[in-house]
Image (cartoon, rainbow, N blue to C red):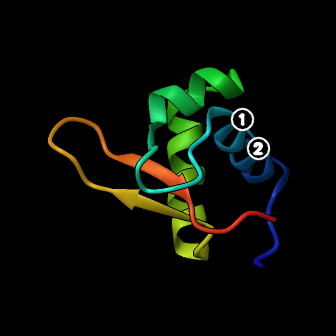
Amino acid sequence: MAELTPMEEMIVKAMQELGATKDSVIKTADDIAKKCNRPKGMVNNNLVTLVQKGVIKRVAREKASGYYILSTQ
């Protein structure tokens, strides 16, 4: 697995706690930002990086995109 920054680790942990570990349970950036208690913009930037590293998957939807973890650490 790719090396993660502390912020990325916080996001992955929050996603695990929210149950976003499979494609049937996805969470929005808003959900994740609230769980992390961090600004949505910061969370969005890190979500993009996590997608590029192959840690999480982005699912495009009509309103907000959703995210889930591809593999647990």
Q: Is residue 19 above or below residue 1?
A: above
Seen in the image, is 3 located left or right of residue 63? right
| Front-lying residue, 62 or 4 | 62
The structure residue drawn at horizontal position 41% and vertical position 49%, both measured from the top left corner, is: 24
Other-residue count near label 2 (Cα within 10 Å), few / some / many at <14 / 14–19 / ≥20: some
**Disc 2 versus disc 1: nearer the observer:** 1
- Quadrant where the C terminus lies? bottom right
Which residue appears farthest toward the left when viewing the image? Answer: 62
Q: How many labels does the image show?
A: 2
State the residue position of label 2: 13
Vertical side of 23 occupied by 55: above or below: below
> Identity of the amino acid at label 1?
Glu
Q: Which residue is drawn at 70% across and 49% down?
A: 12
Q: Mark 1 Cα within 10 Å, few/some/many (few <14, many 20+)?
A: few
Q: Residue 17 carries which label?
A: 1
Side of 65 where 48 appears, left or right: right
> Residue 38: horizontal and vertical position, in percent?
66, 26
Hey, what amino acid is under mark 2? Answer: Lys
Tell me the residue at 73%/52% (across/down): 8
- Determine contact: label 2, label 1, CB under 8 Å: yes
Question: In the picture shown, does residue 53 fall above or below 45?
Answer: below
Task: Please tell me whether residue 43 is drawn above or below residue 34 in the rendered image.
Answer: below
Q: Which mark is residue 63?
A: none
Q: Where is residue 45 in the image (x, y as percent from the top left)?
A: 53, 50
| Marks 2 and 1, how far apart at CA | 6 Å
Label 1: element kind: helix
* x then y, percent, for residue 62: 14, 42
Taking the spot 33% from the left edge, 56% from the top edge, the residue there is 59
Nearest to the observer: residue 34 or residue 22 = 22
The image quadrant of residue 50 is bottom right
